Amino acid sequence: MPTTIVLGTQWGDEGKGKIANLLAMDADVVVRYQGGNNAGHTIVIGDEKFALSLIPSGVTYPTVTPVIGNGCVVDPKVLFSELEMLRSRGVDPSRLRVSHNAHLIMPYHRKLDAVRERFLGKQQIGTTKKGIGPAYMDKYARQGIRVQDLFDAKILRDKLDVALMEKNQLLTKVYNQLPFDAGDIYEEYIGYAGDLEEFVADTSLLVHEAIAADRRVVFEGAQATLLDIDHGTYPFVTSSNPTAGGALTGSGVGPTEIDTVLGVAKAYISRVGSGPFPTELHDEVGETMVTVGGEFGTVTGRRRRCGWLDVVALRYAVRVNGVTELALMKLDVLSEFETLRIANGYTSGGETYTEFPRQQRVLYDCEPIYEDLDGWATDITGVRSFDDLPKEARLYIERVEELAGVPVSMVSVGPDREATFGR
Ligand code: GDP
Ligand code: IMO
Ligand code: MG
C-alpha cells in the first residue's frame, strides 16, 4: 500500500482516525485533505486516548510527517491548542506541515456559522458551529484568507478590510449582531504568523516527493461520503469533498498516484446533526447502539443517531469513491443483539430501490428492506483473527462483502489500536 486513501463511507465517525493511525505505523506521510476542526478522530493506544480534530492521526509516531493539505480549513487557535495538547502529552508534533494554500477559519466564520444555524431554526443543518461552511463559502467566493497571507502583512490587512466590508453589513443588518473590527483580527492573526511559520510548506510538493521516493502515504479523510457536498444528503452535508476525488484536489496529487481506497464503515451506522436516515432506530436497539457504541460526538458531545447497516448507502459509497476494500468497524457492538439486520433496499411509493435514490425525498419516505442474520451474542472484543470469530460473525462479514461488492480487509472489535485484524 504505498498510497492509501482512508475515507468514511457513511455519515462520519466510522473510525477513520483509528484506521489511519494503524496504517500510519508503516507510513511516512499522513495527509488530511479536507474539512477542519469539525472532525473528531479518536485514537486509543493502550491507556492513552487522543481526540484529534485537525492534526492527522499519524502524529503519534516519530517516523511520520503529518500534513494538513490545501483542501483543509484551518482555525489557527485550534491548531495551536491541539499542538499544545500533544506536546503536554509527550507527543512531538514538530514534523507537522501545513499547506501554504489551506484556507483560514476567521472569527467571523465561526460567528456566521452560529447565527445562520439559529436563523434556520427547525431547518438547521446541525453544524458543528466551527465556521467550516462560511470558511468554504469564502474560499469559493474567492474572498478567503489563506495560510500564506499571514506572511504578507499588506495583503492580509487588505483582504480583511474587503471581507469585513461585506461581513459586517451582513452581521449587523441581517443577523442583528455586533460588527468585527478589522484591526483587532489583523493583530490576532498576524500574531499567529511567527508560530506557524516553521510548519508551512508546499505540501503538494512534499507529498509528491514522498510518493516519487516510494514512501508510504496515507490520505486521512474527515467527515464521509454521505456528508459530501456533491454526493451527500444535501443540504445536510458538510462544505467540502470527503470523497476520494477530494483527496486528490485537497492534497495536490493526481489520480494515477493512488493505489488503494480503503472505505471505513461501522457494522451499523450513525449520523450526528439533521437530515434523512432510512435505517434510523428510535427503539431500544438504537439506544443500545448509542450506549454500547459510545455514540457521542468527539467534537460537540452530541448524541449520535444510530441504525442498522445500510448497504444501499454502502454500495453507493463504494461506487463514488472507487473503494477497493473495506474496514468494518465496531463489530463488537453487534454482540448485543440476537438478530442482526442489514438494509439491502428501500421501498417507497410502491417502488423498490436497490441503488441510492436520485430523489432525496425517497430517503425520508422509504421503508428499508431488511435482510435478517443470526447474531453471535458473545463477547468478541478479545478476538484477534477472522478465523477465531464466531461463525455468525464470519457469515455477517461475508454477507457485507457480497452486498457491498468489495472485500472487507480489516475488522475492528474494540476502540484500541490492537483490537483490529486483517482478513
Ligand atoms: P472517526 O471520526 O471516523 O475517526 O471516528 P470517531 O473517532 O469520531 O468515532 C469512532 C469511535 O468509536 C471512537 O470513540 C473510537 O474510539 C471508537 N471505536 C473505533 N473502533 C471501534 C471498535 O471496533 N469497537 C468499539 N467499540 N469502538 C470503536
Ligand atoms: P468525522 O471526521 C460526523 C456533520 C455535522 C452536520 C454537518 C455539517 O469525525 O467523521 P459542519 O460543521 O461540517 O458544517 O456540519 O456535518 N459533521 C460530522 N458528522 N462526523 C464528522 O467528522 C462530522 N463533521 C461534520 O454534524 O450534520
Ligand atoms: Mg469523528
Image (cartoon, helix red, strand yellow):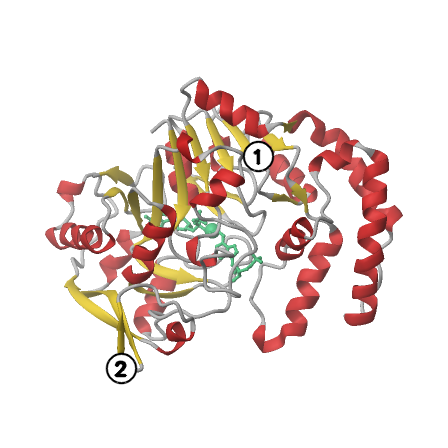
The mark found on residue 238 in the picture is none
Q: Residue furthest bottom?
A: 349
Residue, disc 1: 86
Q: Is residue 187 above or below residue 205?
A: below
Position in image of residue 305 (x %, y %): 42, 66
Give the mark nearest the N terminus, 1 or 2: 1
Residue type, numbered disc 2: Gly
Who is closer to the viewer here, 306 or 140? 140
Q: Is residue 123 above or below residue 15?
A: below
* Quarter in which the C terminus is drawn: top left
Q: Residue furthest top?
A: 213
Position in image of residue 374 (x %, y %): 14, 62
Position in image of residue 241 (x %, y %): 50, 50
Residue, disc 2: 350
**Callout 2 environment at 10 Å: few (<14), some (14 to 19), or many (20+)?**
few
Residue name at image x 68 percent, y 25 percent: 198
Residue name at image x 49 percent, y 32 percent: 253
Determine which quarter of the picture holds residue 348: bottom left
Residue name at image x 14 percent, y 53 percent: 395
Position in image of residue 418 (x %, y %): 32, 37
Residue type, numbered disc 1: Leu
Point out the frontmost of discs 1 and 2: 2
- Residue 166 visible in this rendered orientation of the protein: yes
- Residue 45 visible in this rendered orientation of the protein: no
Q: Are marks 1 and 2 in contact (CB under 8 Å)?
A: no
SS type, badge 1 = helix
